[in-house]
Amino acid sequence: MKTTDSPLYVSDLDGTLLRNDTSLSQYSKDALNALLDQGLLFTVASARSIASMRHVLAGLPLRLPVVEFNGAFVSDLASGQHYLVRTLHRDILSELWQQIAGAGYIPFISTYDGTADRLYYRDITNDGMAWYLRNRQLHHDPRLCYLADLQSGLDDQVVCLTVIGPGPELEKLDEEINQRHAERIQTHCYENQYSPGWHWLTIHDARATKEQGILSLKRMQGLEDCRLVVFGDQVNDLDMFKMADEALAVANAIPALKEQATGIIDTNEEDGVARYISAHWNGTPK
């Protein structure tokens, strides 16, 4: 068993720990399970929700909390209990709604109502939105809730607004939203790798970042002094790369992330994360 001098390993999921078909390979599952049994300090930080994490991480008993929704939640994977919730400020929600609606879009609204997570939706107006809805229905996402008066969903604690559309249009909307609210929000605009041609614009509270989520997790678990090793592939991993002691980009990562990395490892298709951790752990005194 390792001591608390062991590093804390935190990995992104899509494009990093998971393969391109969204699966956790048998090799990665077996390797991580063996190390977890030895005391490995490992968890994940993802744009995914707990509901969509569970099916891809089935069979991987993570004892540490996970960072979900890019840091909007720090939660227990098994129970779904939230230890930390970062919500968008109510006084800007109506303005964000107006900007999104003014651009011709209808968002998906992810909320926490105090007892349960909700994912509200109404009209599905493009193929990118249809993919999003089908994907959640396929995995029996318990958060899904059709809401005829979608704007009333803003009365909950809103953790994320997700807008789906063509890249150039969403990039313009992203710029306009940030011009007005940059100091109070965190946005990410990127192509959905599983639905090519369709981009997602996600809007979170400014405090909802992977960096802040990991810092909170470390405080909760008494791991403030642990060396931090992170893995990622996309723009939403940049903040945790900048705060980590060691930041590893998979070979398929975007160039901007590779520039911030302390090293490049094998691709997600080659089980780069699990192979690196196995080698790194085995090379550290126990």
Image: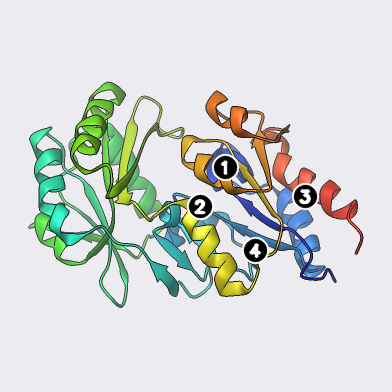
**Residue 216 in the image: above or below residue 10:** below
Query: What is the quadrant of the C terminus in the image?
Result: bottom right
Q: Residue at x 67, y 60 (%)?
A: 42
Question: Could you give the CA–CA distance between mark 3 and mark 1, rounded to whole angstroms?
Answer: 20 Å
Residue type at mark 1 is Lys
Q: Residues within 10 Å of mark 1 (few under 14, many from 20)?
A: some
Circles 3 and 1, Cβ within 8 Å, touching? The answer is no
**Which of the numbered marks, if any, corresponds to residue 59?**
4
Q: In the structure shown, which secondary structural element does the residue marked by tag 3 occupy?
A: helix
Residue 100 x %, y %: 15, 40
**Which of the numbered marks, if any, corresponds to residue 211?**
2
Residue bearing mark 1: 242
Residue type at mark 2 is Glu
Residue type at mark 4 is Gly
Query: What is the quadrant of the N terminus in the image?
Result: bottom right
Q: In the structure shown, which secondary structural element does the residue marked by tag 4 occupy?
A: loop
Residue 6 x %, y %: 78, 63
**Residue 117 in the image: above or below residue 160:** below
| Camera-side mark, 3 or 4 | 3
The quarter holding residue 40 reads bottom right
Circles 1 and 4, Cβ within 8 Å, touching? The answer is no
